[in-house]
Amino acid sequence: MRIIDSTAKNNYFRQTGKYFIDKGIYLILLNLVPSLLLPFMISPSCMMYFLFDLGDVGEVRLVDVLVKMFDVSYSFWYIGIIGLVLMIFSIAISFGVIDRHMRVGEFTLSPSRVKSRLNYNILTAIRFGIAAFICVGLSNFLLALLYYLWLSVFKGIAARAVFCTLSFLAFETLSIILLSTLILWPPFMLHTGLRTGDAFKQAWRSVSGKVKHVALSIWSVVLPFQCVMIVTGMLGLGAVCHTLLDGVAYAVGISY
């Protein structure tokens, strides 16, 4: 099997896109069920949808802004926990599927290999899943605090919209950059046997200087979903539509 070094010409997007078009549908189906459950605990888009409700904000209370982090999932958080647990298992299986394909050229979702893939990959998947969950949750929480600050300081809708939107864009950019620096952390834990901290240091060294290109590749899959979310937000299609769209975004984004 011919090995192509996509880093030689910083060709991350083309090589990733080529692989994803070929095998992505299988990974999406593998991650689909937990992805549809996960938004009930934590939504990747709730802070963006909040921007469309700024005109309806009256008396500003921090608790109201924080509740917006959960949207409809506030009442069904236990479904999200089930989704998180299932996602960790599906990520572990995905690691094994892609690893075997990269090493020996065999891409298989055979149930007979599930047990061995979980045995080898589950601890890495748990670490990665918990780290990603904490990062998303912390980002939403800090962004909610910033929203509350701007809503408290400014009374005009225009000023609120400008500062809240700029804060959202800044946090999104930082989140994608952080994900780009973590992208090689699981492979180093899986393939080298390094401990969590050592694997992270090695991953940081390897991705150093390439973060911008990796981030742009990740942004290429985030941006289309956000465009659709902007339309649904403008049309006010409601929480059910938002949650379903979040689930599809999780399925495609995590697989990508």
Image: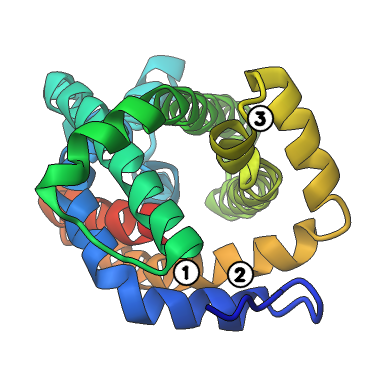
Q: Residue at x 59, y 81 (%)?
A: 2
Tag 2–tag 1 contact (CB < 8 Å): yes
Q: Residue at x 30, y 37 (%)?
A: 117
Sequence-first disc among 1 and 3:
3
The residue under label 1 is 221
Image-quadrant location for residue 199: top right
Q: Residue at x 23, y 50 (%)?
A: 31
Picture coordinates of residue 192, whole percent (x, y): 64, 34
Label 3 Cα neighbours within 10 Å, binned few <14 / some 14-19 / many ≥20: few
Q: Nearer the viewer, residue 200 or 157?
A: 200
Residue 26, relative to residue 80: is it above or below? below
Residue 8, relative to residue 176: is it above or below? below
Picture coordinates of residue 91, whole percent (x, y): 34, 41
The residue under label 3 is 153
Give the amino acid type for the residue marked by disc 3 in the picture: Val
Residue 88 visible in image:
yes
